[in-house]
Image (cartoon, rainbow, N blue to C red):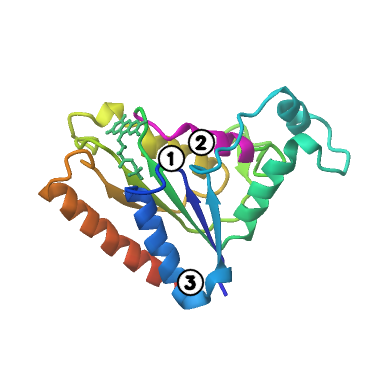
């Protein structure tokens, strides 16, 4: 059995393009490996709290062998990342970047000594601590023109920010399924949805056997 971790961050429970696509992936996975092969972390329904003083003091304090209470949520999230063989992230664009709930999640899981560490090499001062594994990032945007050469390219902080954080902790093997123009719901949008569905189906099949 291969374990899939699905992370949803759309605040919409219905009518969500990213949820429809991550759900499609999860259903294909369950069809192959069974329901227990999928862990669902729903950040849209249950946004993690912002990290606070106690969290930072614990995360950067000397380890004493026990997990401080302030880090228990972080530990749960991190163990899911280690347990997963494949990770699927649903990430809508909110105000040109990722939803606050997803950023709060990353603040919880990017931790020195757990998901990254400092390295001696001055050329490369950080080393990731999560073993490499495939990540599928599903994005949806209201407008178009965010791709390379598009009118809004310079305003797209979604995929670049996600790729930077994921790569930093060892999850740089990323495939994308992207939809844009969701607010138009026109022919072009429908075509993008169909292409994203095809991409999801292909990735779910390929990653189940690789
Ligand atoms: C709070 C909020 C902020 C948004 N900001 C942007 C934006 O900056 N640029 C954009 O193109 N679309 C923006 N949108 C549109 C969403 O990206 C689009 O509706 C997307 O499909 C949402 O993902 P979902 O369908 O999975 O919920 C925003 C939507 C919401 C609800």
Residue 106 drawn at (x, y percent): 56, 38
Question: Which mark is in front, 1 or 2?
Answer: 1
Rendered location of residue 70, percent (x, y): 75, 34
Label 3, label 2: how far apart the Cα atoms are: 26 Å
Determine whether 7 is above or below 24 in the image.
Answer: above
Q: Between residue 96 and residue 161, name the one nearer to us.
A: 96
* First of labels 3, 2 by sequence position: 3
Residue at the far top in the pictured view: 53
- Label 1 secondary element: loop
Quarter of the figure with residue 55: top right
Secondary structure found at label 3? helix
Q: How far apart are labels 3 and 1 at the CA level?
A: 24 Å
Residue under numbered circle 2: 101
What residue is shown at x 52% (from left), y 50% (from top)?
Answer: 171
Q: Which residue is mark 1?
A: 11
Magenta span of residues: 96-109
Residue holding disc 3: 30
Give whichever of discs 3 and 1 has the lower sequence position: 1
Q: Is residue 103 magenta?
A: yes
Task: Give coordinates of residue 177: x percent, y percent.
Answer: 32, 53
Magenta: predominant secondary structure element? helix
**Residue 154: numbered disc:** none
Left or right of 70 on screen, residue 102 = left
Tell me: is circle 1 under 8 Å from ligand 1. yes
Discs 1, 2 touching: Cβ within 8 Å = yes
Confirm or deny contact between disc 3 and disc 2 (CB under 8 A). no
């Amino acid at each position: 059995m291969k374990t899939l971790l699905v992370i949803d961050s759309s605040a919409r429970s219905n009518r969500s393009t990213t949820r429809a696509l991550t759900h499609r992936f999860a259903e294909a996975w369950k069809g192959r490996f069974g329901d227990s092969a999928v862990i669902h972390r729903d950040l849209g329904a249950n946004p993690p709290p912002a990290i606070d003083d106690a969290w930072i003091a614990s995360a950067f304090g000397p380890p004493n062998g026990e997990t401080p209470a302030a880090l228990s949520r972080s530990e749960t999230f991190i163990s899911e990342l280690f347990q997963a063989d494949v990770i699927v992230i649903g990430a809508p664009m909110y105000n040109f970047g990722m939803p606050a709930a997803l950023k709060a999640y990353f603040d919880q899981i990017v931790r020195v000594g757990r998901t990254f560490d400092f390295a001696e090499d001055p050329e490369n001062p950080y080393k990731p601590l999560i073993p490499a594994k495939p990540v599928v990032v599903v994005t949806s945007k209201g407008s178009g023109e965010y791709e390379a050469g598009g009118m809004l390219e310079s305003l797209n902080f979604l995929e670049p920010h996600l790729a930077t954080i994921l790569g930093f902790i060892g999850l740089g093997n990323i495939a994308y399924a992207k939809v844009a123009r969701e607010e138009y719901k026109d022919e072009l949008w429908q075509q993008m949805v169909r292409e994203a569905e095809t991409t999801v189906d292909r990735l779910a099949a390929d990653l189940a056997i690789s």
